[in-house]
Amino acid sequence: MFAALRRQYLDILDSIYIFNEHRGYSSLDRVLDAVRRRHPEATDFVAAVEKHRADEEKHYHMFRRYFELLGYKPYAVDKTCAHIDRLIRLTFGCDIDGLDTDAVIASDDLFNRLCRVIVLTEQRGMWQVDKLLTMNFIREERALFQLFKVVERDEPSHWMPYDDWLKEHGGRQASWRERLADAFVHKSLILYKLPLLFLNPWLKRRTDWQHESDTHPVGALQPA
């Protein structure tokens, strides 16, 4: 029975992760659009965002392969499990799909706020992966442990370029309100959403893979 509960917990945890990885790389198309249009001369920054997107897509497909080897699909979690969406909603008043890219491009304040949200999200992800890698139930699942080691290796490059950009262009660091919003999203996911999913006997698995409905299935948006 313990083994079954452990498997259930891991499947839910990994379902949240694969959803967030897909949500991450598909959302970064909008970020790339904003960066390319606002700062076309910042080629190093654009390349860093492109790498961030590519890594998120790589991680998604690694989780997909992990589930394929298990012989089933992830659970059908939704945007209430997406850290970036919930943090964007708390700081911008909408989720990432509703973000007005033109307004972000036109405003230093909004563009810098978007960079700060990404920094907070990716730093939180790095901290969480570091914690998971110390846990026995992750270390005992060798394929999953190796997967998270890849994520751990990639994570610093997912927030440092945005942090450097803010420092180099006079953008302020995250405010206490933004940090509080990040902490609230994280705690609610760990202490409320994940246990709620674990205890839900009607939780269904996906019947497809997220990437099958991607608007841009290969690579990121091209420059405008």
Image (tube, helix red, strand yellow):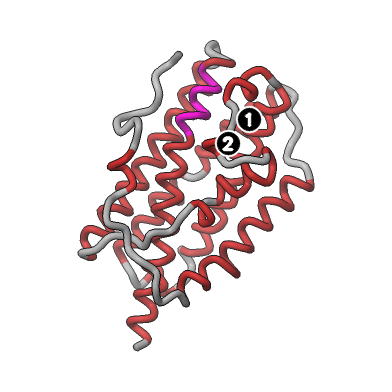
Amino acid type assigned to the residue bearing label 2 in the image: Met
Magenta range is: 28-36
Position of the C terminus, as image quadrant, is top left
Q: Position of residue 157 (x, y in %)?
A: 50, 38
Relative to residue 166, is residue 26 drawn left or right?
A: left
Relative to residue 179, is residue 220 drawn left or right?
A: left
Residue at 40% from the left image edge and 45% from the top image edge: 22
When asked about the image quadrant of residue 114, the answer is: top right
- Which residue appears farthest toward the front when viewing the image? 202
Q: Position of residue 55 (x, y in %)?
A: 40, 39
Task: Say if 39 sits above or below 190 in the image.
Answer: above
Indicate yes or no whether the magenta region holds residue 32.
yes
Q: Is the C-beta separation of discs 2 and 1 under 8 Å?
A: yes
Relative to residue 180, is residue 20 drawn left or right?
A: left
Relative to residue 147, is residue 189 drawn left or right?
A: right
- Which residue appears farthest toward the bottom when viewing the image? 1
Amino acid type assigned to the residue bearing label 1 in the image: Asp
Q: Which mark is residue 160?
A: 2
Position of the N terminus, as image quadrant, is bottom left
Does dot 1 land on a helix, a strand or a loop?
helix
Indicate yes or no whether the magenta region holds residue 159.
no
